[in-house]
Amino acid sequence: MTAVSLESFLDQLRQFRADASAALDAASDAAAFEAARVEFLGARSGRLKAIQKQLGGLSVADKPAAGRHFNEAKATVEALLTAAQDRVAATTAGVTAEAIDVTLPGTPVPLGHVHPITQTIRRVQEIMGRLGFESVDGPEVEDQWHNFQALAIGAEHPARDPLDNFYLAVARGADPLLLRSQTSTVQIRVMETRQPPLRIVSLGRVYRPDTADATHYPMFHQVEGLLVEKGTTMAHLKSVLRLFASSFLGGDVHVRFRPSFFPFTEPSVEVDMEWGGRWIEMGGAGMVDPAVLEAVGYDPREVSGFAFGLGVERIAARRYGVADIRDFYRNDVRFLQQF
Ligand code: PHE
């Protein structure tokens, strides 16, 4: 074997590293990369292999240093090779992902829709709107005047029981506020600020500390209706509720009044609706009590009115055939998708 000097051996390693590095940097696709791999690290005729063969021609004294440099150069070029391989793979993947085949059929975009309770609210507003009832809002945090006192629910009335209401802690001595337990509060708020004739409907959340079951939930929605005009009677009340019921549920709905009591209506009734052979209690109603008209500054000898309050979850459950109102609030898309 021809003698090889350490210097010329190290020169060749330097050249090898420089050439390999340049070639791998330039490799921009899989074919160029593979060609560089074969040229520099190929097991049979690669340049590293050729350099390795010269190790035998070095003097015994130079061999350890030459071996160390050889291994270093080999490790460096192998690392460059791995890096180049990753780079080429990433570019190739990017190109594939960006390529759009415009001849493929489109993928449908899943569309959401409003919650069934919101759908029900909008439908009720629309039907009542056609009967001339304007939709208004009221606050969910109420004072005792609007939730009770103005509705003739006196200080000692059991409806004020802390166990039946969500009172909010406020500074001692002040009248505690509460989450409204009924939307009848809005009757008062509207009558306090406007003069008759009035036709309003108000839909919103109410709160009562009930244990959740198939027909109860501590938060639910009510639709409140109020009409105050000269000469209003129970017949108007029943006509409006019947028109509403048949628009909402279908033409063959029956509406039934059962005598009842509410402090703010006189007379008062429970409202039942029959549809598909089943009677369901939908809420309460009655003629606005003269004491309430007086509390808001109206003259009960001049005007009379009716009011009603129905449970939105009940009418939604009836309409959509839902057996358990808790399903409305589980937020399970499989349930909500059906409406
Ligand atoms: N606010 C009553 C309730 O929550 C329902 C009602 C409204 C009754 C209007 C009469 C008139 O039970």
Image (cartoon, helix red, strand yellow):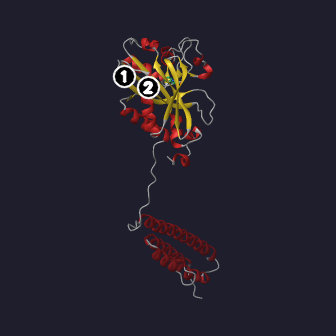
Number of marks present in the image shown: 2
Q: Is residue 162 above or below residue 326?
A: above
Residue shown at the point (44%, 55%) measured from the top left: 109
Residue 33 drawn at (x, y percent)? 48, 74
- What kind of element bears circle 1? strand
Question: How far separated are the C-alphas under marks 2 and 1?
Answer: 14 Å
Instruction: Give SS at disc 2.
Output: helix
- Report the front residue among 266 and 316: 266
Of all residues, the one furthest to the bottom in this rendering is 1
Task: Give the amino acid type for the residue marked by disc 2 in the picture.
Answer: Leu
**Which residue does the numbered mark 1 point to in the structure image?**
198
**Of the image marks 2 and 1, the number of the one nearer the N terminus:** 1
91 shown above or below 128: below
Residue 186 in sight in this render: no
Residue position marked by numbered label 2 in the rendering: 237
The quadrant the N terminus occupies is: bottom right
